[in-house]
Amino acid sequence: PEGDGSVFRRGDSFHLAQVFLEESFPNGLINLLGIWWAPGAGTVWHNLSRTELEGKAYRFCADQWWVGAEGKLVRISANAGLINDVLHAVTASNVQVDRQPFSGIPLMDGKFDPLTGKLAPFQLGDFVTWTLPYTYGQVMDSADAGDQAGERQWLDFLSEGSSDQDIALLQEFFGYCLSGSTEHQKSLWIYGPPGCGKSVIFKVLIAIVGENRVAARQAENFRSNFNADLS
């Protein structure tokens, strides 16, 4: 055929879907609980909306060819029915990622080991879907500069109304949030009278991880059935 594209037996949407996956998502495309994920730069996985996936499928199919019984080639008409068939086939052939135990803190340019101070590249099996808004260089520059006054101010603030056990728990929970892991299925509830510093603690944590990496729920969201429909 003239121009780009491949030739497919008319109606073979499964083969069409396979080539679509190979050419459009060479590093993989997976569906987890109805959400599509594809790796981007640095092998960090990004959420792909249904609209984005359909758009890629439309553009791909419009460049391909059908071959009929008599060997005649016809440009594929990328209509809604065909796109649905292709995406159904993509879902059926979905391959799960072999997820590896992830350790470290996900930075913009790799996973950081705070114990060794070293940076390692992400692997697809890490299934990293978010990172802290800092690079390794920024973290190390901050550590070298040191802010003993700021650290002392933070510890003094915590010690005003918290025990050593509470402070250690906060440190552990902050580290849990920085890791990006949810494997322990833990949340932290802080209670106390007005003005005791509850909001300050969470504002500091939000500033560390970045506002666009935080979701908020009101207490009434948890009144019944654990709000299992919330994600």
Image (cartoon, grey):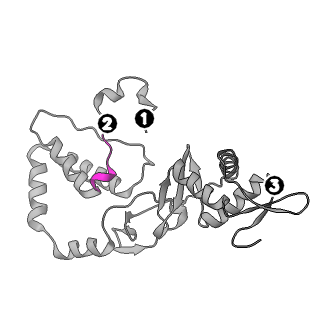
Q: Residues within 10 Å of mark 1 (few under 14, many from 20)?
A: few
Tag 3–tag 1 contact (CB < 8 Å) = no
Q: Which residues are magenta?
A: 210-216
Q: Is residue 97 visible?
A: no
Q: Which mark is residue 230?
A: 1
Residue depicted at x 27% and y 38%: 189
Q: Which mark is residue 142?
A: none
Residue depicted at x 11% and y 67%: 148
Give the residue type that dot 1 points to. Answer: Leu
Task: Specify which label sits upstream in the sequence, 3 or 1.
Answer: 3
- Examine the structure image and report whether residue 214 is included in the region drawn in magenta: yes
Tag 1–tag 2 contact (CB < 8 Å) = yes
**Outermost residue toward the top in this view:** 224
Q: Is residue 106 visible?
A: yes
Q: Which mark is residue 10?
A: 3
Q: Could you tell whether 70 is left or right of 228 in the image? A: right
Secondary structure of the residue carrying tag 3 is loop
Find disc 2 in the rendering and name its residue.
217
Q: Could you tell whether 66 is left or right of 190 in the image? A: right
- Examine the structure image and report whether residue 161 is included in the region drawn in magenta: no
Residue 98 lies in quadrant: bottom right
Q: Could you tell whether 45 is left or right of 143 in the image? A: right
Q: Position of residue 167 (x, y in %)?
A: 20, 50
Secondary structure of the residue carrying tag 2 is loop
Secondary structure of the residue carrying tag 1 is loop
| Separation of residues labelled 1 and 2 (CA atoms) | 9 Å
Q: Residues within 10 Å of mark 2 (few under 14, many from 20)?
A: few
**Outermost residue toward the right in this view:** 70
Observer-nearest of 225 and 85: 85
| Separation of residues labelled 3 and 1 (CA atoms) | 42 Å
